[in-house]
Image (tube, helix red, strand yellow):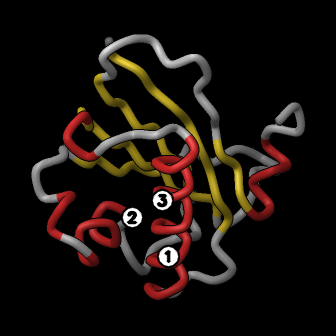
Amino acid sequence: MLCAVRGAITVPEDKPEAIRVAVHALVETLLERNAIAMDTMVTVFFTITPDLQSLNPATALREVTDKWQSVPLLCSQEPVIQGMLPRCLRILIQWNAPSRPEAITPVYLGEARLLRPDL
């Protein structure tokens, strides 16, 4: 069964290391909270606000470990919207699960918590 989960995190500054740290914190938290195994991954989509230009999040994810080499990763820029949350990185992870999970837990870290006050 194809499953998907969303998440977001804000990055304190547009520097490669800050983006790396944010990407890994967000991805690892999503994988852990949703018990997603690497061998079930289908795709990962990132979007970033236009003020994050120093490193592509997909590149950041592939830099640390080889386990992401076989997962299709895609990154695009968020549309510019008046009042948008600055330095925000969003993610959509899709994976195959043997059955429907009881719960899928989105993860919003840092100032990105403002995007989903219901969580």
Mark 3 highlights which residue?
Answer: 28
Q: Are marks 1 and 2 in contact (CB under 8 Å)?
A: yes
Q: Nearer the viewer, residue 5 or 1?
A: 1
From the image, state whether disc 2 or disc 3 is nearer to you: 3
- Residue type at mark 3: give it: Glu
Q: CA distance from mark 2 to mark 3?
A: 14 Å
Mark 3 Cα-neighbour bin, 10 Å: few <14, some 14–19, many ≥20: few
Residue at image coords 21%, 58%:
68
Q: On the rendered structure, is 77 left or right of 111?
A: left
Residue 54 vs 10, above or below: the answer is below
Q: Nearer the viewer, residue 37 or 113?
A: 37
Q: Are marks 2 and 3 in contact (CB under 8 Å)?
A: no
Q: Are marks 3 and 1 in contact (CB under 8 Å)?
A: no
Mark 1 highlights which residue?
Answer: 19
Secondary element at image label 1: helix
- The percent coordinates of residue 14 (x first, y second) are 56, 81
Mark 2 highlights which residue?
Answer: 57
Which numbered disc, 2 or 3, marks the residue that appears first in the sequence? 3
Residue 46 vs 18, above or below: the answer is above
Which numbered disc, 1 or 2, marks the residue that appears first in the sequence? 1
Marker disc for residue 94:
none
